[in-house]
Image (cartoon, grey):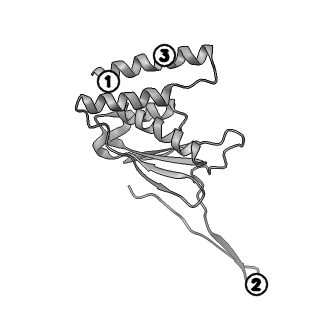
Amino acid sequence: MVADLLLAKLRELQATVESTEPEASILPTCLSLLDQLGTVLGGGGPPPLTTREDRYGGVEIEVPISAADTPHALGVELSRRIEQWAAAGKRGLWLKIPLECAAFAGSAAAQGFQFHHAKPEYVEMTRWLPTDQPSPLPAYAFTQVGVGGVVVNSAGHVLMGEALWRALL
């Protein structure tokens, strides 16, 4: 695809510029030009990411299953959105990728996302945007809590009980 080749060349150019002028960034301009090229060539671009702000100043992002065939274009879209969220002062990003779009996980990891947890139908990745403070994003819950009790009667007899949990097979 022409757009993929152009994006690869634009990223090479970006790396060259950054190696000579570390503060320079032409990527936003390149991505905008790539969008315009996609429109001219009739490309509709990737399906939009579903997003919603959380109560902690972060963003929950969901990749639509319809994006399964466009992991590269989705990576470009995510890159653009990350820049917007960082400029808007957003903090934690939560990215939910359905199993059908698993090929996109590599692109997300390349953009700084880390694996948080996985379920049979999706993987959840996170990214903390502020660079001047450590991430307070919680780890995935993995501890099991059990309940037990001991009763001692006046005769010194002991009754012990515990709640057992067993996964259904």
Question: Going from the N terminus, do you reach mark 3 or mark 2 first?
Answer: 3
Question: Going from the N terminus, do you reach mark 2 or mark 1 first?
Answer: 1
Residue found at the very far left of the displayed protein: 42
Tag 2 residue: 155
Whole-number angstrom distance, CA of label 3 to CA of label 1: 15 Å
Is any part of residue 115 visible from this angle? no
Judge the density around disc 2: few (<14), some (14-19), many (≥20) Cα neighbours within 10 Å. Answer: few
Q: Residue at position x 48%, y 16% from top? A: 13
Tag 1 residue: 3
Whole-number angstrom distance, CA of label 2 to CA of label 1: 83 Å
Q: Position of residue 109 (x, y in %)?
A: 50, 33
Q: Is mark 1 on a helix, strand or loop?
A: helix
Q: Position of residue 21 (x, y in %)?
A: 62, 17
Which amino acid type corresponds to the residue marked 2 in the rendered image?
Ala
- Towards the viewer: 34 or 162: 34
Judge the density around disc 3: few (<14), some (14-19), many (≥20) Cα neighbours within 10 Å. Answer: some
Q: Is mark 2 on a helix, strand or loop?
A: loop
Query: Would you place residue 96 above or below residue 31 in this image?
Result: below
Which amino acid type corresponds to the residue marked 1 in the rendered image?
Ala
Nearer the viewer's eye, disc 2 or disc 1?
1
Tag 3 residue: 13
Left or right: 97 as drawn, with respect to 135:
left
Q: Residue at position x 31%, y 34% from top? A: 70
Is any part of residue 11 visible from this angle? yes
Q: Residue at position x 34%, y 23% from top? A: 4
Query: Would you place residue 131 above or below residue 141 in this image?
Result: above
Looking at the rendered image, the quarter that the C terminus falls into is bottom left
Question: Going from the N terminus, do you reach mark 3 or mark 1 first?
Answer: 1
Whole-number angstrom distance, CA of label 3 to CA of label 2: 84 Å
Q: Is mark 3 on a helix, strand or loop?
A: helix
Quadrant of the rendered image containing residue 34: top left
